[in-house]
Image (cartoon, rainbow, N blue to C red):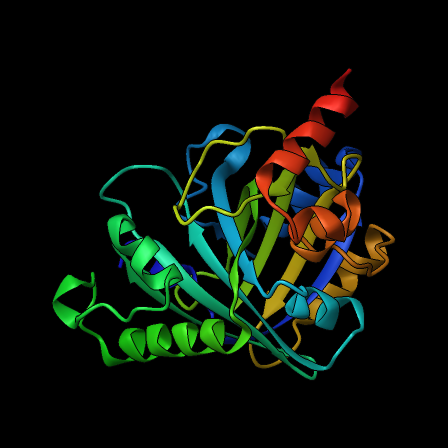
């Protein structure tokens, strides 16, 4: 699939919140080791759009697992890059096992997203890929969502600049900015937002990602720019910023609160 090569099935991730003023020199440093991701090339500020809809239980079980620092946890989300009718929507499981991140995802047509959210497994002929790994990932996504009785809770949007190691994508550095979130309870892969809240407003989220051996030059980068690891959670950070109660109710309550904040 067009965007599927972005995925690293198993990796390690280190996250940092950095100031905008160091982005340019940091970018210059990284460019000596990596090249721009195909989807960043030619884009303003080297950045492409990412949308995600996160699914969770009414009690926000996956959010609480993150807040509590559970070593073995997962998130369920829909990931997509635009609103075009023919563009795929990826059903993703992002699982943490101790310090390792494992991802599985399956591309589906946008028009069958409501079916997936309802817990129905589409027949193979309706899918965008016949690869067994994709079908198995979709089966697992639906199984986990049904186990939690998970429904859409949050929609986020941000801009990503991505740098990758040539040829194998074993090393990846991303810079995420303008992260906006809001409660969402629908069953579509939407791109519009009604009353978004900006999180990590003063920062850019830097992620250093690698498979296998930790790259030695990461140590140099961290030391040169005096980086300190920190939490930068795009789902749980959004839920915590807005308030859990707004993700356990329905849209009218959120809309009234948003209108109150704007007045």
Give the quadrant of the N terminus. Answer: bottom left
Q: Would you say 110 lies left or right of 36 here?
A: left
Quadrant where the C terminus sits is: top right
Q: Nearer the viewer, residue 84 or 259?
A: 259
**Between residues 75 and 158, which one lies in front from this camera angle?**
75
Quadrant of the rendered image containing residue 85? top left
27 with respect to 119 (left or right): right
Q: Residue at x 45, y 32 (%)?
A: 43
Q: Compared to 254, does 189 lie above or below?
A: below
| Residue 9 in view, yes or no | no
The foreground one among 254 and 11 is 254
Tell me residue 87's x, y (percent): 28, 45
Could you tell whether 195 is left or right of 242 in the image? left
**Residue at point 63% right, 51% down?**
30
Residue 185 pos. (x, y %): 52, 47
* Residue 262, horizontal then vertical, whole percent: 75, 19
């Amino acid at each position: 699939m067009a965007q599927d090569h972005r995925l690293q099935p198993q990796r390690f991730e280190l996250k940092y919140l950095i100031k905008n003023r160091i982005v340019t020199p940091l970018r210059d440093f990284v460019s000596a080791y990596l090249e721009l991701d195909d989807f960043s090339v030619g884009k303003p500020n080297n950045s492409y759009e990412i949308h995600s809809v996160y699914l969770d239980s009414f009690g926000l079980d996956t959010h609480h697992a993150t807040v509590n620092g559970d070593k073995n946890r997962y998130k369920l989300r829909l990931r997509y890059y635009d609103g075009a009718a023919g563009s795929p929507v990826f059903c993703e499981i992002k699982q943490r096992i101790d310090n390792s991140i494992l991802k599985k995802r399956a591309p589906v047509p946008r028009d069958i997203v409501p079916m997936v959210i309802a817990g129905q497994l589409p027949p193979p002929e309706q899918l965008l890929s016949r690869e067994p790994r994709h079908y198995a990932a979709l089966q697992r996504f639906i199984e986990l969502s049904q186990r939690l009785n998970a429904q859409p809770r949050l929609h986020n949007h941000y801009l990503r600049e991505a740098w990758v190691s040539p040829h194998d994508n074993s090393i990846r550095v991303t810079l995420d900015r303008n992260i906006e979130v809001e409660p969402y309870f629908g069953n579509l892969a939407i791109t519009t937002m009604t009353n978004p809240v900006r999180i990590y407003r003063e920062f850019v989220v830097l992620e250093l990602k690698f498979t296998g051996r930790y790259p030695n030059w990461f140590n140099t980068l961290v030391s040169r720019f005096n980086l300190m690891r920190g939490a930068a959670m795009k789902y749980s950070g959004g839920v915590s910023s807005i308030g859990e109660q707004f993700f356990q109710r329905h849209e009218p309550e959120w809309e009234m609160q948003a209108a109150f904040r704007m007045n």
